[in-house]
Image (tube, rainbow, N blue to C red):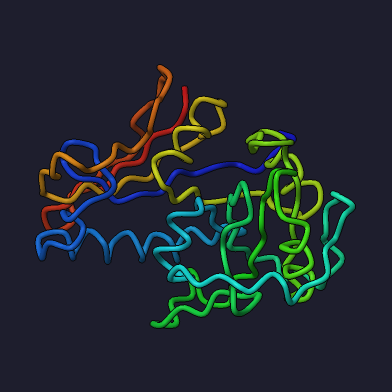
Amino acid sequence: MNRPYIICHMVTSIDGKVTGDFLFQKESAEATEIYYRINRERKADGFICGRVTMEGSFTGGWYPDLNQYNPVEKKSDFTAVERSGFYAIAFDTHGKLGWKSNRIVDPDGDPGYDGAQIVEVLSEDVDDRYLGYLESMKIPYIFAGETFIDVELALFKLKDLMGCETLLLEGGSILDGAFERAGDVDELSLVVAPVIAGKDSKPLFMDADIANFELVKFENEKGNLVLNYKRK
């Protein structure tokens, strides 16, 4: 395989939603804890999230003043930094995430996230000054398309340039859908909370294509279903 093995790992509601207020109900707390435990146990080479998920979980919407950075005009991959082998990979098409460190600082020190080296996956439609900012922060970045991110190209580079063999795909639903349409979801790891989501919640895969998976494992943990599927 010329790309990493991809495991889509998510908490869902009974009706297959992955965003919304249901995640913050007390009835979902146990499912969330199971999700974090599995995230630690899988020991992947890193996790992948989209811009919105990274912003909500880690950056809080902060963004640097790009006028302070010299533009980098040549659109070539930047990986000439010491690499950790454990990565937080942000699919950030237009370079809109602001990082204050080149590693994730998890407030709870969760080893499934804390210390992960940030990697930005970008399109070429990005401010040259943003590249200067990333290089000043020693944050690796790779390009995977002109105006949008080509999932397969991104994954090829993550394996070829960063040495990633197994990665957890952890949302959001738009990014999950892009991976599913590309045929690049090899396994599903789902923790189903005993809750129905609200009408504004988003599905596991946005704009999905038909795909076939086989249920290979299931457990009931304190009223939460833990499901594992593999692509047929």
Quadrant the N terminus occupies:
top right
Q: Quadrant of residue 108?
A: bottom left
Please tell me whether residue 106 is drawn above or below residue 79 in the rendered image: below
Q: Position of residue 61 (x, y in %)?
A: 46, 68
Farthest-out residue, right: 74
Farthest-out residue, top: 210
Farthest-out residue, front: 67
Q: Nearer the viewer, residue 226 or 106?
A: 106
Residue at image position (28%, 40%) is 202
Residue at image position (61%, 73%) is 64
Residue at image position (40%, 17%) is 210
Residue at image position (72%, 40%) is 144
Q: Position of residue 212 (x, y in %)?
A: 41, 20
Q: Nearer the viewer, residue 208 or 44?
A: 208
In the rendered view, does 161 fall on the left or right side of 216? Answer: right
Please tell me whether residue 23 is drawn above or below residue 104 in the rendered image: above
Counting labels gives 0
Q: Quadrant of residue 96?
A: bottom right
Q: Position of residue 90 (x, y in %)?
A: 58, 56
Please tell me whether residue 59 is drawn above or below residue 27 in the rendered image: below
Q: Nearer the viewer, residue 97 or 189?
A: 97
Q: Position of residue 68 (x, y in %)?
A: 74, 77
In the rendered view, does 19 fall on the left or right side of 21? Answer: right
